[in-house]
Image: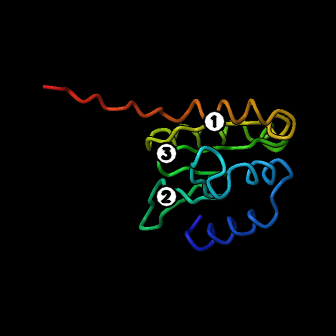
């Protein structure tokens, strides 16, 4: 998709979130999850063909750790091949991709939170040498 078409589609997706996406967003927006900044429906430039850039839309995105979060509803049962190819492209660009089902987000938030935080490297405090 071209940029403005994709951007419009992403904006529409923000307005018509699934229940699981709304719950996820409420838990992570405004740095509510461990101070991490997330964006919704984030455009990722992945390819250029004849001068036209193509974009994927990531469900949720954390820039600092190059983390993409996808929440899979029933439609993903019918597009597994597309999802796999898309995920390979995104990982090739250096992103981590983590997927949750609607059910996980709706019914087991603590596990979702735990798995998300496992994707974030823990900073190691620097040791000062005394001399």
126 in relation to 86, above or below: above
Q: Which image quadrant: the N terminus?
A: bottom right
- Contact, CB < 8 Å: mark 2 with mark 3? no
Q: x, y (%) of residue 83? A: 66, 40
Categorize mark 1 by other alpha carbons within 10 Å: few (<14), some (14-19), many (20+).
some
Q: Mark 1, mark 2: which one is toward the viewer?
A: 1
The one of 13 and 30 positioned closer to us in this rendering: 30
Q: Give the quadrant of residue 111.
A: top right
Q: Name the residue under label 2.
A: 45
Q: Compute the Cα span from label 2 to label 3.
A: 14 Å
Residue drawn at x 55%, y 50% is: 62
Label located before the other in sequence (1 or 2): 2
Q: Answer few, some or many: residues within 10 Å of disc 2's Cα (few below 14, many 20 plus, some between 14 and 19).
A: some
Q: Which of marks 3 and 1 is nearer the N terminus?
A: 3
How are the colours assigned in the image? rainbow
Alpha carbon distance from label 3 to label 1: 12 Å
Dot 3: few (<14), some (14–19), or many (≥20) neighbours within 10 Å? Answer: some
* Element at label 3: loop
User: Which label's residue is closer to the chain start, 2 or 3?
Assistant: 2
Give the residue furthest to the front.
131
In the rendering, at what x and y percent does residue 64 appear?
Answer: 47, 49
Which residue sits at x=67%, y=30%? Answer: 114
Number of the label disc, if any, that sits on residue 116:
1
Q: Which residue is drawn at 57% across and 54% down?
A: 37
Q: Name the residue under label 3.
A: 66
Q: How far apart are marks 1 and 2 (CA)?
A: 24 Å
- Label 3 vs label 1, nearer the camera: 1
Q: In the displayed structure, would residue 88 be above or below residue 129?
A: below
Q: Which mark is residue 103?
A: none
Tell which of 22 and 35 is nearer to you. 35
The picture places residue 116, in percent across and down from the top left corner, at 63, 36
């Amino acid at each position: 998709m071209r940029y403005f078409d994709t951007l419009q589609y992403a904006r529409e997706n923000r307005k018509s979130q699934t229940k699981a996406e709304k719950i996820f967003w409420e838990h992570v927006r405004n740095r509510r999850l461990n101070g991490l900044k997330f964006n919704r429906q984030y455009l990722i430039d992945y390819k250029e063909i004849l001068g036209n850039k193509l974009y994927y839309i990531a469900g949720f995105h954390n820039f600092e750790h190059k983390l993409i979060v996808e929440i899979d509803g029933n439609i993903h049962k019918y597009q597994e091949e597309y999802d796999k190819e898309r995920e390979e492209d995104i990982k090739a660009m250096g992103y981590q991709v983590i997927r949750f089902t609607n059910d996980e987000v709706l019914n087991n938030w603590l596990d979702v939170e735990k798995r998300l935080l496992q994707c974030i490297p823990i900073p190691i405090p620097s040791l000062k040498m005394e001399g």
